[in-house]
Image (spheres, helix red, strand yellow):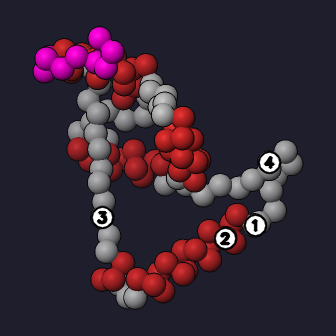
Amino acid sequence: MLLMIDFLSGALVGADMNLAHVTKEKSNKGHLFLAIDPTIFGNSETFKRAVTARINEIKTSKKAPGILEIRAPGERNSRERGANLESGEVLIDAICWDDGLKLGATLGVKPPGS
């Protein structure tokens, strides 16, 4: 699946792929946004029930030794978001922060606290 995403958000749109988008200076970053309306294919409640049942099946399956929990995609981020909202702090990758500061300087926007 990750390889397909790499192809669709990289090769398809002429962007760098794999680690080049973070290791290559001035890399060409690509994005893919995909929206599917499940009602086109049938009842959305039936879809939601099927997805929920499958996720529950996966989460309750046998865990590898040393693994305490099986998480669904996005579950960790959801927990982190809750913790961030509670603490009022967000960890930001240094490269993203630096890029944001440069963009802000270009646009004349000063970072908070400056």
Q: CA distance from mark 1 to mark 3?
A: 29 Å
Q: Are marks 3 and 2 in contact (CB under 8 Å)?
A: no
Q: CA distance from mark 4 to mark 2?
A: 17 Å
Segment tinted magenta in the rendering: 106-114
Mark 3: give few (<14), some (14-19) or many (20+) Cα within 10 Å.
few
The residue that appears at 65% across and 55% down in the rendered structure is 71
Mark 2: give few (<14), some (14-19) or many (20+) Cα within 10 Å.
some
Q: Position of residue 83 (x, y in %)?
A: 57, 41
Q: Position of residue 37 (x, y in %)?
A: 31, 74
> To which residue does mark 3 refer?
35
Q: Earlier in the sequence, mark 3 or mark 4?
A: 3
> To which residue does mark 1 refer?
60
> To which residue does mark 4 refer?
67
Looking at numbered disc 1 in the image, what kind of residue is underneath it? Thr
Whether 111 is among the magenta residues is yes
Secondary structure category for the residue under label 3: loop
Secondary structure category for the residue under label 1: loop
The residue that appears at 49% across and 30% down in the rendered structure is 89
Tell which of 31 and 73 is nearer to you: 73
